[in-house]
Image (spheres, rainbow, N blue to C red):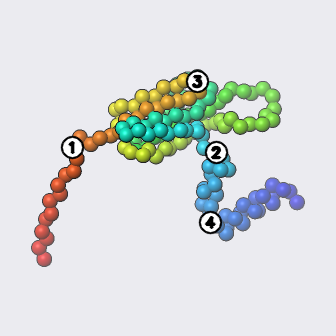
């Protein structure tokens, strides 16, 4: 029997037993997410460092910020096309990564720089201009 057919049958049986979304829990283990990131937080800033080797055209990376979410889109291409792959540990290809931030950030104070294969994104905490808590008035409903 074809081993790939056995694998397909095994996966189909697992899907049937555990449900279609069973494999989603293992996505980061079976297929690591790219780009790899480190996230650092201070009281009022967040620094995101993304590993994006081989980036030669900065226009090919898109960075979006929405309240407490950072989104990265682009492609990693190390540019090697000669020979047969014997071992491949440097992940490459098109990516779209959404990162939840520990607090809301300002969309008008974002700085992104690229150096030696690392993308540095500096974000600043959004502090409400309302000056703190607001009193909520209570309205009496008549029966």
Q: Are marks 2 and 4 in contact (CB under 8 Å)?
A: no
Read off the residue under disc 4.
19
* Of callouts 1 and 3, the N-terminal one: 3
* Of callouts 4 and 1, the N-terminal one: 4
Read off the residue under disc 3.
116
Callout 4: SS: loop
Read off the residue under disc 1.
131
Give x and y (percent) for residue 135. 17, 55
Label 3 to label 4, Cα distance in Å? 43 Å
Residue 73 in view (yes/no): no
Give x and y (percent) for residue 35. 58, 38
* Of callouts 1 and 2, the N-terminal one: 2
Give x and y (percent) for residue 60. 54, 28
Which residue is rendered at x = 13% and y = 77% of the image? Answer: 143
Which residue is rendered at x = 62% and y = 49% of the image? Answer: 28
Quadrant of the rendering where the N terminus is positioned: bottom right
Label 2 to label 4, Cα distance in Å? 22 Å
Based on the displayed image, in which of its 4 quarters is residue 55 positioned? top right
Which residue is rendered at x = 49% and y = 33% of the image? Answer: 62
């Amino acid at each position: 029997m074809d081993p790939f057919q056995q694998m397909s049958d095994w996966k189909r049986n697992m899907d049937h037993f555990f449900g279609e979304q069973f494999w989603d829990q293992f996505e980061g283990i079976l297929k690591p997410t790219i780009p790899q990131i480190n996230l650092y937080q201070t009281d009022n800033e967040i620094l995101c460092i993304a590993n994006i080797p081989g980036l030669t055209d900065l226009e090919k990376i898109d960075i979006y910020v929405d309240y407490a979410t950072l989104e990265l889109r682009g492609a990693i291409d190390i540019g090697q096309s000669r020979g047969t792959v014997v071992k491949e540990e440097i992940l490459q290809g098109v990516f779209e990564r959404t990162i939840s931030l520990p607090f809301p950030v300002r969309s008008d104070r974002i700085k992104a720089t690229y150096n030696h294969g690392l993308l540095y994104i500096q974000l600043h905490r959004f502090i409400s201009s309302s000056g703190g808590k607001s009193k909520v008035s209570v309205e009496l409903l008549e029966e």
